[in-house]
Amino acid sequence: MHTPCDTDILLVTHPKVGTTWTKAILFALKNRMHYPDLQEHPLLTNIPHDLVPLLEGDIYTKKKVLDLDPAFPRLISTHLPYALLPTSVKDSTCKIVYVYRNPKNTFVSLWHFQNRLYPTTNSLEEAFDKFCRGMNPFGSYWDHVLSCWKESIQNPGRKMLFLKYEEMKEQTTTYLKRIVEFLDCPFSLEEEAKGTMNDISRLCSFDNLSNLDVNKSGKRHLPDHSAAYFHQGNTGDWVNFLTPKMAEKLDHIIEEKFHGTGLKL
Ligand code: A3P
């Protein structure tokens, strides 16, 4: 079995907050010395989920053996909330990258995803009611975010980086710099001059990834599964789906849950 290494990098996300995109970004940034030719990059022929294994899926359930040298940082992802991570992971000093997203966009994205893969899913209203009651595959969205956020406050020595999807979309290269600094592999002056961050930003962009054959037609577990991870990649889709009353209800829940925590969703 795999045991956590202090050098591991763990991406922790609630589903639909931009996991696929962040997997691509982390993979491209961390391995940029191995793949200098972006025309031959593994992201062009592999869905990001096949490059960054899921702890509870690929590693635990499917017993996938990581062919990564533990001497080098291994990149692993999980949808488990921080509180439910194995003690061995919590006790390690691995770096944690946590991505969160506007809850209205997260909900709408989840609804589209479920509808596309399981077309008999509930109506928007029923799905919204479940989301508000925290009935999601990995528990309530707000508890998921707060679980990691509270750990970062209580344990300031824990190496955690919080990234918000909407902010990353707005200023991708700024966030790429922030990520490489967090991972202790900052861009060199030469890379800055060459524009490596712009190249990686383009490589991982929605337009690029969503148009690749591997992501358009890959099957994974279900037909249409790969393409379902690339829906629209926008930051304000919720206005087209939620009524003002629904938006108000979600705002109220968020206000109540996040009041005084210092985190703004
Ligand atoms: P939308 O449904 O709002 O379009 P996850 O990867 O956690 O399942 O999140 C999926 C969301 O991320 C979807 O949002 C999807 O379109 C968006 N996404 C996927 N790839 C992306 C990329 N390269 N850049 C930005 N957003 C991306």
Image (cartoon, rainbow, N blue to C red):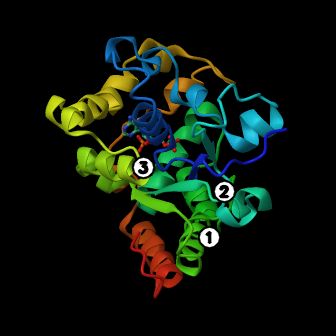
Label 3: how many residues lie within 10 Å, few (<14), some (14-19) or many (20+)?
A: few
Mark found first going from the N terminus, 3 or 1: 1
Which amino acid, mark 3? Asp
Q: Compared to 212, does 10 lie above or below?
A: below
Q: Tally the numbered discs.
A: 3
Mark 1 → mark 2, Cα distance in angstroms:
15 Å
Secondary structure of the residue carrying tag 3 is: loop
Label 1: how many residues lie within 10 Å, few (<14), some (14-19) or many (20+)?
A: some
Secondary structure of the residue carrying tag 2 is: loop
Mark found first going from the N terminus, 3 or 2: 2
Determine which of the numbered discs, if any, sits on residue 184 in the image.
3
Mark found first going from the N terminus, 1 or 2: 2
Residue 164: give x, y in percent of width and height: 39, 58
Q: Nearer the viewer, residue 125 or 165?
A: 165
Which amino acid, mark 1? Ser
Determine which of the numbered discs, if any, sits on residue 147 in the image.
1
Q: Residue at x 72, y 56 (%)?
A: 89
Residue 58: give x, y in percent of width and height: 73, 33
* Residue 175 relative to residue 35: left or right: left
- Name the quarter where the C terminus is drawn: bottom left
Residue 163: give x, y in percent of width and height: 41, 57
Q: Compared to 204, does 104 lie above or below?
A: below
Which amino acid, mark 2? Asn
Question: Does mark 2 have its CB less than 8 Å from ligand 1?
Answer: no
Mark 3 → mark 1, Cα distance in angstroms:
25 Å
Q: Nearer the viewer, residue 236 or 188?
A: 188
Secondary structure of the residue carrying tag 1 is: helix
Spot the residue most to the right: 1
Mark 3 → mark 2, Cα distance in angstroms:
34 Å
Which numbered disc, 3 or 1, marks the residue closer to the eye? 3
Which numbered disc, 1 or 2, marks the residue closer to the eye? 1
Which numbered disc, 3 or 2, marks the residue closer to the eye? 3
